[in-house]
Each structure stands twice: as structure tokens, then as C-alpha cells.
Image: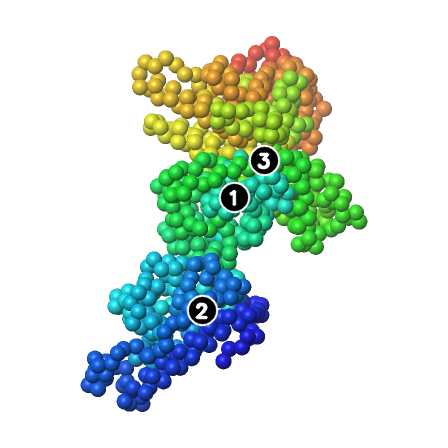
């Protein structure tokens, strides 16, 4: 019936089913026992052709049941260990199955492998509608009908049932009458199918090893595989890639669970935990889970999720990773903790090279004659363009793929701008709900600032770009739970270019700018402001972006003497912010019009302080030229030098005047005239509450008065 060389199509590929024939040899023994059982049953059946057989008992059948010994008179089970290299041998080793367990499994799976067993089991069950073996029939076919202890191999707590290899259905029936069913995934595994259980769709991620993993780190991770539960703590390193590399080096596959996807299916966690554990044991795999911060925020839900997963996966190598610590209440076992540092600049460049080459190999991208020119000597420059970003292996891979496809569409090699745009696309939408996203559209050439202020901005970009090396690898900010963030203060009057400067720094780093809306932060209810800020800081740490707190003195104000409950809670808010800024890992810019209102303790925690002064006459002339641009037609009487000398306006006001004047020129359908520009300036003066004086407007006073 079954040959050693029998082949069957599984999925889209034809695979040899159990090359050594172990599965089919043992299934042949099941068939022989079924044949014998049918013969015994037929010999004692007075009328096998009765069409109503199985629906009633004759008096003779009742006497036979009462007087007979019971069972099918089959020889007792003879233990037979499976071959170590066979699919059954692997199954027995991974799940701790005995030879009896394997025979019971084969009795249960036989109808899925050969439809003839359905009818035969229906006959032996004396009910043609029940075409799968019952617990009692399975034991009888193994020659154990009278062995009461054997029945416990098919009850909760037994390996077959606990591991999900066999399901005992119809719990309303007596134990021996319950039906055995083998899940489709187990049947598929016996036939050589490697496709994971369908219920894990959307939960399993694509695990990629880190090709640049440090040898010492990898060696420690491989050694930790045998300890069961391992936590990889990281603040920007590729923990997932290291875990996958360690498992593969240890000869195991890697099942990567998406923590964010699990958080969306908290109701299914118990089922998913059992299915994952079975999948890992079936395929000889370890499990990688993370980041832990993506699991449900509510502490009880997070603890329940981890307890279910760690409990089901006990005995399976499990790597969990994240930036935080481990709560002992999450699982019975305490993990072995390994630290994953941020990759050096050289390793990061090598990681980008690997990702870009893989992405380019997958599409018909334009290639230069010298392949090394595209992703070789230039890859260091590409990596430097996004050196301020913290990216895991998945984000690097996806960004490289987007950058290569974007460049291929334009029929050119990948450039820094392609990579920056691709990296920005990896940011999640979590911070969009808490702050306003601004995609930078300005650069250093658009700034008109004093040299000292310009140097402070350059220093901010420099700190953001090299923080991992200085603060991480060199450890220049040790102890105290300090983060690796970079925080700057931009102080100056309104309109002096503070927000625009933050946008320029973000553009230089290849990042988006997120402007925090204070209306979403400040709350009249006690404790809510701190919660809102915590959400912002948490999301900002996970996003490669520059966070801008505009008018920061509203929430970073000085602590005061406590005279009533309001003062006490205001001081609590400030104290919380002081602590939270210490542990912040992102890039933040605070702007204020009143630097004196900021608490001195905040100033100590700042990395860069840039003062923005009102521009002088020369800078104002430059601002007028830039704001009016080259495309707006100008009349011959336009005197920008007069405007720069007479009107002490900040850059924001000059920009507002230029826009207003442009509207007036558009209405007149002619070039921009001095009269229109003076009119716009007079309107800006009135908006600012300033007087229109002859000493400033001079010969244009009449025009200003009429405006």
C-alpha cells in the first residue's frame, strides 16, 4: 500500500515524503491492525448486510457484549523506537513522545493520509457517521483495550494533548467515546510541509540575521540559546538580527513574533502562544519576540501576554528584546540578560552595503560599469547621510529597498536624498497623533543669522550625528539612567527664526520635524499633563525625528514656592520633566521668547543653547531679498535698503510683509512697487501694536497713514 519512495505534492513543490519510509512503515502496521480488527468484528456480526446496522442493538448483540471479554482481540502493543533521523524520530525527540504516543498519533492521522480509513473506522465505531477513531478504538488498535493506565496518554497533561499534536473532541461524551483529531498543521508537517500554521498569519515577522554581528556578541548569544529565556537589552542596536543569527548558528530556525501585531490580538494570546510553541517544536526553531515596548501598554495585559507566551514556550529557546528592564511578574523564569550596543560607524556602513546590494539584486536597477562605485566606496557616504538615525535590521532593509526602487525609477544610482527619504518613511504614525509633522523644505543657505548662532546650530547637528559614538561607545554620559538624547534651547524674540532653524537642523539630519501642540499636552486635571508628555517622549524616542517644543516656557517654567495645591502640582510637573529629560533618547529643541522664565535646572540639562537676536540692518536687507525672492517682478522705485535701515523688523515680520505686498502686487496686475511694500509694512506695524512714525517712514508716511 505505501512505498518508501512514495511522493506527494505539498504546497507548490513536490517533496519526498519521509525518505527512509519510517512514517509509511508504521502506518502500514496500523493498516494491518485495522484489517485484523475488521475481520474480528465481521466474524462476530450476525448480519453484516443489515442496512440499519449501527442504529440498534439486537438481543444477541447485547448478550455478546455482556458475556464477551471486550476489545478487538488484538496483540498487545510492542514498543518500537523510531529512527532518529526520520520525521517521527524528530517529532518524538522534540515533544518527548513514547513509541505508544507515536502509534496513537498515527491511528488518529490515518484518515487524513488515506480516505479508506474513514469508512473502516466508521465500521469499527459501529456508527458510519463517526469516521475518526475514538479514544477507545485507538487504544484497542494498539492492543491496549484493557490497560486502564494507557488511556491517560490521551488526556490533558499527556504530551500528545498538551503539545497540540492530537485534539480530543466531543467533551460531552464519555472519555473513551471522544473522537481524536489531528490538526492540519501536524498532518502537513508529517508530509513535509514547512508552511507555518495559518493562525500565525500577520503575527510572524520576517526574521533576517545581522550579517555584521560582532563575533564576541554572537558567541555570547549562541551560548545563551541553551538557557531558554534570554533578554537582549538595546538602545539602538540590532537585537532582532543578533537573535536570529544566534539561533541559526546554533542550528535552529527562527520564528520572529511581531510584538505590535500581538498587541492588536490580545484576546487571541492564549491560542497564539500554544500554536507558536507547537510550530517551534515541529520545525526545531527558537522564538524571537520584540520589541517589548510594543506589547500592550496596560501593565496587566502586558504581563498576561508574556506569561502566556513564556509558559507555552518553556523548553523552547526564546529571545525577547527591548530597551527597558524585565519585570519578574511577567514570567516564572528570569531571563539571562545580554546588552546589544549600537553598531559602530564601520559596521553600520557594512549593514547598509549588505541591504543595498540585496535590494539592488532584486530589481532591474541601473548599474555602473564598476559595481563597487555604486554601493562600494560611496556606501560610507550614504551611511553617513543617515548616521543620526537609529534603525533596526528590518528598517534598514525596508529603507534600502525603497531607496533602490526610487533611484531605479529615475534611472540613476542611489543618492543620500533617496536614503534620507526612505529612512523617514520608516517612522510610524504614533507621534503624528500627538504632534504636527513638518517635512523640512529649507536648508542652511536659507538662514540669515549671526555667526555665533549659526555655529550653535551646527554644533546641535554634530551632536545628533555622533551621539552614539560619544555617549554610547565612549561612555561620556555614564550612570544615573541618563539617556543619549540631544536637547537644545533656542531663545529669542518672536520671528527671529527659531522654528525655521529647527527645521534646518532636521533637514540636515535627514529627519522630519514634529512640533508639539501644547493644546494636546496641558490638561487642567492633575496628573494628565505628565501622562501626555510621557506619551510624547515615548513615541519620540522610537521615531527618527526632531521634536520641537514651541513656547516651551509654558511647560518648562520655573518652580516656585509652594503656597497652595496649585503650586505644588505645578512643581510636580516641572520635577517630572526634569527627570524625563534626563532619560530621553531622542533629539529635542525647546524654543522660548522669555529665557528667564525657564527653570535653571532645565538649563543645566541642555546640550546646546542658541540665542536669536533681532537682525541688524545688513541681515534685514538679506532677509528682504530672500523673502521677496527672484520670481516676484519688482518696480524700479523699490528701495529695499531704505526698508532695511528704517524698519527694525524680525525675520518673521519681514516674511509677513513680503507676502502681504505680493498679494497687493497680484491684485494690481503689475510689478511690486514701493507704495505696496510700505503699505504692507504699515499693516504689520499696526498688527504688532507699533506706532507709525515719520522718523521711520519718512517720505512714505502718507502712504503708511492711508494703509
Q: Secondary structure at mark 2?
A: loop
In the rendered image of this protein, does residue 464 appear above or below residue 618?
Answer: below
Tell me what residue is drawn at x 45 percent, y 54 percent.
Answer: 276
Residue 194 got which mark? Answer: none
Mark 1 or 2: in front is: 2
Q: Secondary structure at mark 3?
A: loop
In the rendered image of this protein, does residue 628 appear above or below residue 279?
Answer: above
Residue beneath label 3, please? 342
Decide if residue 196 is on the left or right side of residue 397. left
Along the line of sight, which residue is nearer the eye, 283 or 579? 283
Question: Picture quarter containing residue 703?
Answer: top right
Along the line of sight, which residue is nearer the eye, 375 or 288? 288
Gap between marks 3 and 2 measured at Cα: 52 Å
- Please report whichever mark, 3 or 2, sits nearer to the chain's N-terminal start: 2
Decide if residue 259 is on the left or right side of residue 355. left
Along the line of sight, which residue is nearer the eye, 606 or 33? 33
Number of residues whose C-alpha sits closer than 10 Å to that of mark 1, classed few (under 14), some (14–19) or many (20 or more): many
> How far across and down, in percent of the image, does residue 1 sit?
49, 80
Q: Quadrant of the C terminus?
A: top right
> How far across and down, in percent of the image, does residue 652 sit?
57, 23
Residue beneath label 2, please? 80
- Please report whichever mark, 1 or 3, sits nearer to the chain's N-terminal start: 1
Residue beneath label 1, please? 224
Gap between marks 1 and 2 measured at Cα: 35 Å
Q: Secondary structure at mark 1?
A: helix
Amino acid at each position: 500500500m505505501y512505498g518508501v519512495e512514495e511522493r506527494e505534492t505539498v504546497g507548490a513543490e513536490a517533496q519526498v515524503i519521509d525518505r527512509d519510509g519510517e512514517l509509511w512503515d508504521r502506518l502500514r502496521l496500523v493498516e494491518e491492525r485495522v484489517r485484523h480488527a475488521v475481520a474480528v468484528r465481521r466474524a462476530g456480526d450476525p448480519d453484516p448486510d443489515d442496512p440499519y446496522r449501527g442504529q440498534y442493538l439486537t438481543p444477541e448483540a447485547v448478550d455478546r457484549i455482556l458475556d464477551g471479554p471486550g476489545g478487538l482481540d488484538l496483540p498487545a502493543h510492542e514498543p518500537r523506537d523510531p529512527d532518529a533521523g526520520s520525521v517521527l524520530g524528530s517529532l518524538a525527540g522534540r515533544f518527548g513522545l513514547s513509541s505508544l504516543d507515536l502509534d496513537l498519533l498515527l491511528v488518529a492521522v490515518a484518515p487524513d493520509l488515506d480516505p479508506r480509513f474513514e469508512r473502516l473506522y466508521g465500521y469499527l465505531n459501529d456508527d458510519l457517521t463517526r469516521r475518526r477513531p475514538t479514544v477507545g478504538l485507538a487504544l484497542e488498535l494498539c492492543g491496549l483495550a484493557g490497560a486502564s493506565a494507557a488511556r491517560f496518554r490521551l488526556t490533558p497533561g499527556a504530551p500528545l494533548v498538551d503539545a497540540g499534536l492530537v485534539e480530543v473532541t466531543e467533551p460531552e461524551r464519555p472519555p473513551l467515546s471522544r473522537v481524536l483529531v489531528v490538526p492540519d498543521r501536524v498532518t502537513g508537517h508529517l508530509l513535509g510541509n514547512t508552511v507555518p500554521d495559518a493562525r500565525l498569519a500577520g503575527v510572524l515577522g520576517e526574521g533576517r540575521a545581522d550579517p555584521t554581528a560582532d563575533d564576541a556578541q554572537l558567541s555570547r548569544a549562541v551560548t545563551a540559546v541553551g538557557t531558554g529565556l534570554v533578554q537582549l537589552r538595546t538602545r539602538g542596536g540590532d537585537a532582532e538580527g543578533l537573535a536570529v543569527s544566534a539561533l541559526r548558528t546554533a542550528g535552529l530556525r527562527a520564528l520572529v513574533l511581531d510584538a505590535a501585531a500581538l498587541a492588536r490580538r490580545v484576546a487571541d494570546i492564549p491560542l497564539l502562544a500554544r500554536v507558536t510553541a507547537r510550530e517551534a517544536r515541529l520545525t526545531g526553531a527558537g522564538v524571537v519576540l520584540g520589541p517589548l515596548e510594543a506589547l500592550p501598554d496596560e501593565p496587566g495585559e502586558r504581563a498576561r501576554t508574556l506569561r502566556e507566551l513564556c509558559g507555552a514556550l518553556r523548553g523552547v529557546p526564546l529571545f525577547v528584546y527591548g530597551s527597558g528592564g524585565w519585570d519578574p511578574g511577567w514570567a516564572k523564569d528570569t531571563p539571562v540578560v545580554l546588552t546589544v550596543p549600537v553598531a559602530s560607524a564601520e559596521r553600520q556602513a557594512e549593514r547598509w552595503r549588505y541591504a543595498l546590494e540585496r535590494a539592488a539584486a532584486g530589481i532591474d536597477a541601473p548599474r555602473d560599469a564598476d559595481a563597487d562605485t555604486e554601493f562600494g566606496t560611496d556606501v560610507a557616504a550614504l551611511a553617513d547621510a543617515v548616521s543620526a538615525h537609529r534603525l533596526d535590521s528590518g528598517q534598514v532593509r525596508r529603507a534600502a529597498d525603497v531607496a533602490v526602487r526610487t533611484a531605479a525609477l529615475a534611472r540613476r544610482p542611489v543618492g543620500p536624498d533617496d536614503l534620507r527619504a526612505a529612512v523617514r518613511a520608516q517612522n510610524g504614525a504614533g507621534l503624528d497623533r500627538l504632534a504636527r509633522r513638518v517635512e523640512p523644505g529649507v536648508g542652511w543657505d536659507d538662514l540669515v543669522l549671526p555667526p555665533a548662532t549659526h555655529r550653535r546650530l551646527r554644533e546641535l547637528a554634530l551632536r545628533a550625528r555622533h551621539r552614539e559614538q560619544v555617549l554610547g561607545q565612549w561612555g561620556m554620559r555614564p550612570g544615573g539612567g541618563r539617556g543619549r538624547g540631544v536637547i537644545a534651547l533656542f531663545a529669542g524674540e518672536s520671528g527671529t527664526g527659531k522654528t525655521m532653524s529647527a527645521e534646518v537642523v532636521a533637514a540636515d539630519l535627514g529627519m522630519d520635524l514634529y512640533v508639539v501642540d501644547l493644546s494636546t499636552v496641558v490638561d487642567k486635571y492633575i496628573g494628565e499633563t505628565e501622562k501626555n508628555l510621557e506619551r510624547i517622549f515615548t513615541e519620540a524616542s522610537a521615531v527618527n525625528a526632531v521634536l520641537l517644543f514651541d513656547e516651551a516656557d509654558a511647560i518648562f517654567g520655573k518652580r516656585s514656592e509652594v503656597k497652595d495645591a496649585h503650586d505644588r502640582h505645578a512643581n510636580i510637573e516641572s520635577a517630572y520633566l526634569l527627570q524625563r529629560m534626563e532619560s530621553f533618547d531622542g533629539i529635542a529643541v525647546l524654543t522660548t521668547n522669555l529665557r528667564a522664565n525657564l527653570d535653571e535646572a532645565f538649563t543645566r540639562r541642555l546640550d546646546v543653547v542658541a540665542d536669536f537676536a533681532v537682525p541688524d540692518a545688513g541681515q534685514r536687507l538679506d532677509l528682504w531679498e530672500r523673502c521677496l525672492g527672484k520670481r516676484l517682478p519688482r518696480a524700479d522705485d523699490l528701495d529695499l535698503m531704505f526698508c532695511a535701515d528704517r524698519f527694525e523688523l524680525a525675520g518673521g515680520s519681514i516674511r509677513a510683509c513680503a507676502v502681504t505686498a505680493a498679494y497687493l502686487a497680484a491684485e494690481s496686475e503689475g510689478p511690486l512697487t514701493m507704495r505696496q511694500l510700505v503699505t504692507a509694512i504699515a499693516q504689520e506695524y499696526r498688527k504688532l501694536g507699533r506706532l507709525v512714525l515719520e522718523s521711520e517712514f519718512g517720505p512714505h508716511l502718507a502712504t503708511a497713514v492711508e494703509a
